[in-house]
Amino acid sequence: MEIFGYGRVSTGQQTAENQRLELEKAGYPIKPEYWFADEGISGKTSASQRPAFKQLKSQIRRGEIIVVNKLDRLGRDAIDVLQTVKQLGEMGVKVVVLQLGNTDLTSPAGKLLLMMLSAVAEMERDLLVERTQAGLARAKAEGKSLGRPSKTSPEQQIEITQKLASGISVSAVARDYNISRATVIGIRNGVGHL
């Protein structure tokens, strides 16, 4: 049974070596051939899209262990972490996170912990949406224009409508104003400021 270690750092100027040393200090000696690190890979990249993590998954076998320093090394968000841990668990691989007191996330207690963390993450997402909606409502109430700036002025929109009414094609109008056909069609259909 081998112990695999995984680390990730966001920028090319950083190194995952400190993460490997931290794992060893915690009692997880990792052979060089079982250490995998994605360096210069953003946390926004899902685990399944990271080259070193994909390589680790192709080599790790049932009954072996993967150890990481922190939960966020395993995925970009709670959903990604849950999916990653579930896949590894289905492969018969134990997942240990030092940050969580050496908890095996594939054990019953680890699964419970993950579910609680997932619930907290979902609540945070819901609160973010709520705050965003409140901010948009406030901005609207203050008369602020929301969305992208208009590609055409109100005067241009009137001109465009008149040109279309006179029989000039959508494509010709789009070329004249250096805008897309979709914008011209939106103006023709009265969608508003596009």
Image (spheres, grey):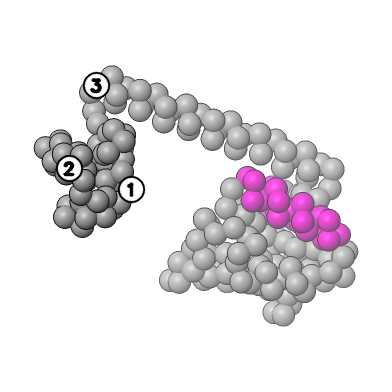
* Secondary structure of residue under mark 3: loop
Q: Relative to 16, is 184 on the left or the right?
A: left
Residue 37: in magenta span: no
In this orientation, which residue lies closer to the viewer: 120 or 189? 189
Residue bearing mark 1? 182
Give me the C-alpha separation between circle 3 and circle 2.
Answer: 39 Å
**95 is within the stretch colored magenta:** yes
**Magenta segment:** 78-100
Instruction: Determine if residue 56 is in view.
Output: yes
- Give the image location of residue 106, x and y in percent: 81, 50
Question: For residue 155, which quarter of the picture?
Answer: top left
Secondary structure mainly formed by the magenta segment: helix
* Residue that label 2 marks: 166
Relative vertical location of residue 169 with respect to residue 37 in this rendering, above or below: above
Image side of residue 162 versus residue 25, left or right:
left
Residue at image point 31% right, 43% down: 185
Quarter occupied by the N terminus: bottom right
Q: Quadrant of the C terminus?
A: top left
Task: Residue under label 3, please give it.
Answer: 142
The quarter of the picture where residue 32 lies is: bottom right
Q: What residue type is labelled 2?
A: Ser
x 29%, y 46%: residue: 183
Alpha carbon of mark 3 to alpha carbon of mark 1: how far? 30 Å
Identity, as a three-letter code, of the amino acid under mark 1: Ala
Q: Earlier in the sequence, mark 2 or mark 1?
A: 2
